[in-house]
């Protein structure tokens, strides 16, 4: 059994959220550059260039890539041979988020109660997804999530009789209905299968995939390409200025499901879909 002081977790989460907000994953940067190369509209090309200038400035000046520094989404994969010591696990995680957002001068966007809406002042609590894995390591994925894109997401419980085309249309229509709200170019995370809540989690996890890598399953790769074409054909373009490159990637995550159901969730990510992985 490997003993791990919870203070290590706090420190790692603090640093991860600051860095995640100041930098973009390389795959997203490359996908935006690819979109600019493919775009035919000069206005959208200029909008994509402003995205590039923005992240370069953010990196150079140690500033957040976007003013919406997000709700703190954390995926923690904890090895079964890890024993957290010297404190409370949950408090240590929250302290890491608290320190990231206060010491890193990141906008605090979380309200304590969804209806009474008083800001917690330190961006806690985070959205925490924990899985137990083999080994004695802890994998931390810190993914600040802005709500311009989150608000455009959708979930639908299809019946098993639904066709592949109906699912493609649902995903494409969700992204098209979003228009310029999620700050396109967008990433489209799609969960298919599981149950009601797990399907949404799959869609969020799908946003972590590098948009420059293809789906390894040819069946889903073809679906992703079809959906991408449908969305791009709507002509939304970067920031909604009317162009050919609305989507950086459509990523599908399937999972076994019940014989009587077919859940499909769509989680929209913007051009500033930030995440960083740290191993302890
Ligand atoms: S959708 Fe993304 S780029 Fe737009 S404001 Fe929100 S976090 Fe920023």
Image: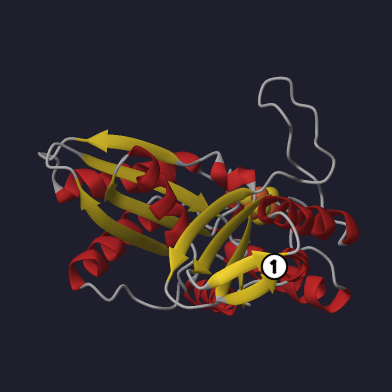
Q: In this orientation, does residue 199 appear?
A: yes
Give the percent coordinates (x, y) of residue 257.
Answer: 21, 47
Give the percent coordinates (x, y) of residue 228.
Answer: 35, 60
Locate the N terminus by quadrant: bottom right
Crowdedness near tag 1: few (<14), some (14–19) or many (≥20) residues, C-alpha within 10 Å? many
Identify the element where label 1 is drawn.
helix
Name the colour scheme.
secondary structure
Figure check: 28 above or below 164: below
Q: Which residue is mark 1?
A: 20
Give the percent coordinates (x, y) of residue 12.
Answer: 73, 70
Q: Is residue 67 left or right of residue 210?
A: right
Locate the C terminus by quadrant: bottom right
Q: Residue furthest top?
A: 116
What residue sits 70% from the left and 44% below the top?
125
What residue sits 27% from the left and 41% below the top?
263
Figure check: 148 above or below 212: above
Q: Is residue 65 left or right of residue 103?
A: left
Give the percent coordinates (x, y) of residue 44.
Answer: 59, 62
Figure check: 16 above or below 88: below
Q: In this orientation, does residue 246 appear?
A: no
What residue sits 38% from the left and 61% below the top?
250
């Amino acid at each position: 059994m490997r003993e791990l002081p919870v203070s290590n977790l706090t420190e790692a989460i603090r640093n991860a959220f600051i860095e995640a907000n100041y930098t973009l994953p390389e795959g997203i940067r490359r996908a935006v550059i690819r979109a600019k190369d493919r775009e035919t509209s000069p206005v959208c090309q200029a909008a994509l260039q402003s995205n590039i200038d923005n992240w370069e400035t953010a990196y150079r000046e140690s500033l957040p890539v976007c003013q919406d520094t997000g709700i703190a989404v954390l995926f923690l994969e904890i090895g079964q041979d890890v024993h957290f010591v010297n404190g409370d696990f949950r408090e240590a995680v929250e302290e890491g988020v608290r320190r990231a957002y206060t010491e890193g001068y990141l906008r605090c966007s979380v309200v304590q109660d969804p209806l009474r809406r008083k800001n917690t002042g330190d961006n806690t609590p985070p959205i925490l997804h924990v899985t137990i894995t083999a080994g004695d390591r802890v994998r931390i994925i810190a993914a600040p999530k802005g709500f311009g894109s989150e608000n455009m997401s959708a979930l639908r419980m299809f019946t098993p009789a639904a066709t592949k085309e109906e699912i493609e249309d649902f995903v494409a229509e969700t992204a098209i209905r979003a228009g310029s709200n999620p700050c396109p170019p967008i990433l489209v995370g799609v969960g298919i299968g599981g149950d009601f809540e797990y399907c949404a989690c799959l869609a969020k996890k799908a946003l972590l995939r590098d948009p420059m890598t293809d789906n390894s399953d040819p069946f889903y790769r073809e679906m992703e390409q079809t959906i991408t074409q449908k969305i791009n054909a709507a002509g939304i373009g970067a920031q909604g200025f009317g162009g050919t490159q609305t989507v950086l990637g459509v990523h599908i995550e399937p999972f076994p499901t019940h014989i009587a159901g077919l859940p499909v969730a769509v989680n929209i990510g913007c051009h500033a879909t930030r995440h960083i992985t740290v191993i302890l």
